[in-house]
Image: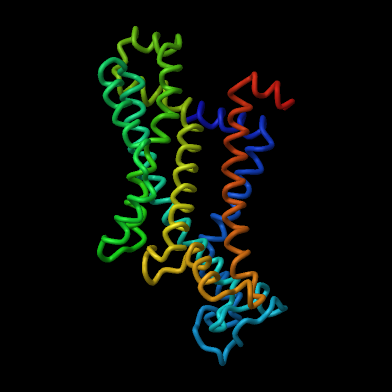
Amino acid sequence: MGRFLQAMHGLWKSSHKVQAGVIIITFFIVVALLSAPITALIGHGHDPLDIDVSISPAWQSPNAQHWLGTDRVGRDILAMTVIGLTASLEVGVIAGLISTVIGTIVAFVAGYKGGNIDNFLSSFTDMFLVVPSFPLLITLSAYTANVNLFTIALILAIFSWPFAARTIRSQVLSLRSRPYVELAKVTKFNDMEIIFTELMPNLLPFIGVGFANAALGSVFALVGLEVIGLGPSGTLDLGLMLNWSQQWGALTLGAWPLFVAPVVVLGLLFLSVNMINIGLEEVYNPRLRKTAGA
C-alpha cells in the first residue's frame, strides 16, 4: 500500500493534466453524492422536479431563481441536470466496476501465464472487440423486460471489459519479466502473491484509467440509448434530457439550457478522462513526454 501511495503521489505531482482531469471528475462525483441537498437548495423548500406549473411557469429563461430556466412543465433545469448526472454516473460506476473486474482478471491471467492460455483469452477478447456492440445494445434493451439502471449497467459492462483487458494485459506482459518478479519467483512466491504484491501495485493507475474509460463509455452508451428512447423507464438521466430537448423542440423555443447543460457535462467528463489518459502517457512514455515538451 505504501508503494502504491508513493506512486500515486509521484503521478499527481508529475502531470498537470492528471491533476486537472482528477479535479473535474472529483467535482462531478461530489455533486452526485450531494445531489439531494443541492436539489433541495435549488427548490427553495419545494421539489424543483415537481410537475406543477403553479410553482414555476413553463419555459422560463435563466433567471435569479432558476439559473438554467425551466422545462415545459415548470421543472428546474439545473436540478434536472444534477439528478441526471447522478443517475448517469451510477450506471457508469456499476458498469465500470463490473467490466474492470472482468477485464483485470482476464488481463492478469493471460499476460502472466502466457502460452496457450494467453492465446485463448486474447482471441476471446478480440472476438468481443469486433462485435458491433451498439446494435446489440439496442436489441437487448428493446427486448429486455423491466429495464432499470442495474440491468442497463450489466448489459453495458458485457461490452466494456475487452478494452481494459487489452490495455492491462500489455502492461502485465512488460512487467512479468522484470527483475523483481524474477526475484519473487526465486523466493518461492506463488502466482497469486506475485500478482497482488509485485504486479498489481504497479498497474493500479492503468486499472483506474481502465475503470474511468469503461465508466465513461457506459455513460455515453446510455445517452445513445436514451436519445432513441430505449433507456430505463422512470429514471431521469442526461440522455433523457437530450431526448426531451429533441422531442419538445427546446432549441426552437429558446430553451437552450435543456440541451446545452447535459452536453456541457458530458463534454467535461470526456475531457477529464482524456486529460488523465494523456497525462499517464506522458509520465510513463518518456518519448511522448519529450515530444510534448512536458
Where, by quadrant of the figure, is residue 18 drawn?
top right
Expressed as whole percent of the image width and height from the top left, the position of residue 226 reads 44, 63
Relative placement, left or right, of 143 versus 43 is left
Q: Residue 98 or 71: which is nearer the viewer?
A: 71
Residue at the spot 61% in from the left edge and 31% down from the top edge: 11
Left or right side of 20 for 178: left
Colouring chosen for the image of the structure: rainbow
Q: Is residue 212 above or below residue 264?
A: above
Q: Is residue 238 above or below residue 64?
A: above
Q: Residue at x 67, y 30 (%)?
A: 14
Q: Residue furthest bottom?
A: 54
Q: What is the quadrant of the C terminus in the image?
A: top right
Left or right of 63: which side holds 98? left
- In the figure, 177 relative to 95: above or below? above
The residue sitting at the top extreme is 186
Q: Position of residue 255 (x, y in %)?
A: 64, 75
Q: Quadrant of residue 139?
A: bottom left
Residue 2 image point, x, y percent: 51, 29
Horizontal arrangement in the rendering, residue 219 relative to residue 232 (left or right): right
Q: Nearer the viewer, residue 62 or 205?
A: 62
Residue 58 picture quarter: bottom right
- The residue that appears at 40% across and 23% down in the rendered structure is 197
Q: Is residue 234 above or below residue 85?
A: below
Q: How many marks?
A: 0
At 61% from the left and 75% from the top, the residue drawn is: 42
